[in-house]
Amino acid sequence: MSNQAVSTTVNGDPVQFVCDPRETLLDVLRDRIGLTGSKEGCGTGDCGACSVTVDGRLVCSCLVLGVEAEGKKIETVEGIAEGPNLHVLQEKIIEHAALQCGICTPGILVAAKNLLEKNTNPTETEIRYWLAGNLCRCTGYDKIVRAVQAAAEDLRKAG
C-alpha cells in the first residue's frame, strides 16, 4: 500500500500529513503531528486513554485510521486549554486530586469536555455513564466524577 496525504484540522489548526493507510489516528497524532497527549493504554478501544473527538463525536483514536481524518475536525487534549489558561475541567481535576499516574487523564478530559458541551447539567449517573469507556486504575472514579460536577457548576455560573 502506498502512503496517503491527508488534510484535516486538529485543535483548530489546519494540518497535513502523509501516512500509511493502516496507521491509526493515535499513531498519526503522536508520531507525525507531535501531539503526545493521547495515550495508548490498550490499543483495542477498551480503556479510553486515547479518546479524541472527530467532528464532535467522541472516539478512541486507536480504532480510527489516520486516513479517516481527511476533511474532519479533530480535537485532542492539547486543544482543551486556551493558551496558558487551563480549562475549568483541568482546574477541577487538579483541585479534586482526580489524577495520579496520568495515563487516563487526557482521555477523561476529552470525554468530560465532550459531555459538558452536550449537557451542561449532567447528573452523577450521566457523568458515570459518559465516562464508562475511560478506565482509571489509580484514583477510582469518585474524585473524577466530583471534578466533572464541579466543572459543570462553574461553567453554568459563567454561562
Image: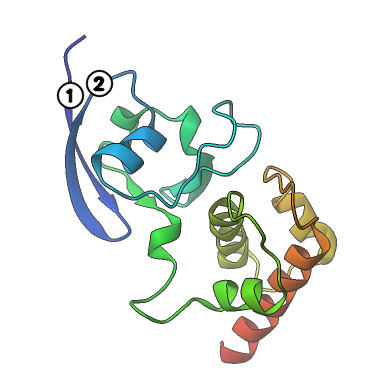
Q: Quadrant of residue 13?
A: bottom left
* Residue 1: x %, y % from top left: 21, 9
The residue located at (63%, 55%) in the rendering is: 101
Q: Which residue occupies the extreme bottom position in the image?
A: 157
Q: Nearer the viewer, residue 104 or 147?
A: 104
Q: Which residue is mark 1?
A: 4
The residue located at (52%, 41%) in the rendering is: 59
* Residue 147: x %, y % from top left: 71, 72
- Left or right relative to 68: residue 129: right
Q: Which sits earlier in the primary sequence, circle 1 or circle 2? A: 1
- Left or right relative to 63: residue 69: left
- Left or right relative to 134: residue 9: left
Q: Which residue is mark 2?
A: 20
Question: In the rendered view of the protein, which quadrant contains the C terminus?
Answer: bottom right
Q: CA distance from mark 1 to mark 2?
A: 6 Å
Element class at badge 1: strand
* Residue 151: x %, y % from top left: 65, 77
* Residue 118: x %, y % from top left: 59, 63
Q: Type of residue at label 1?
A: Gln
The vertical placement of 32 against 53, above or below, is above
Q: Tags 1 and 2 in contact by the CB under 8 Å rule? A: yes
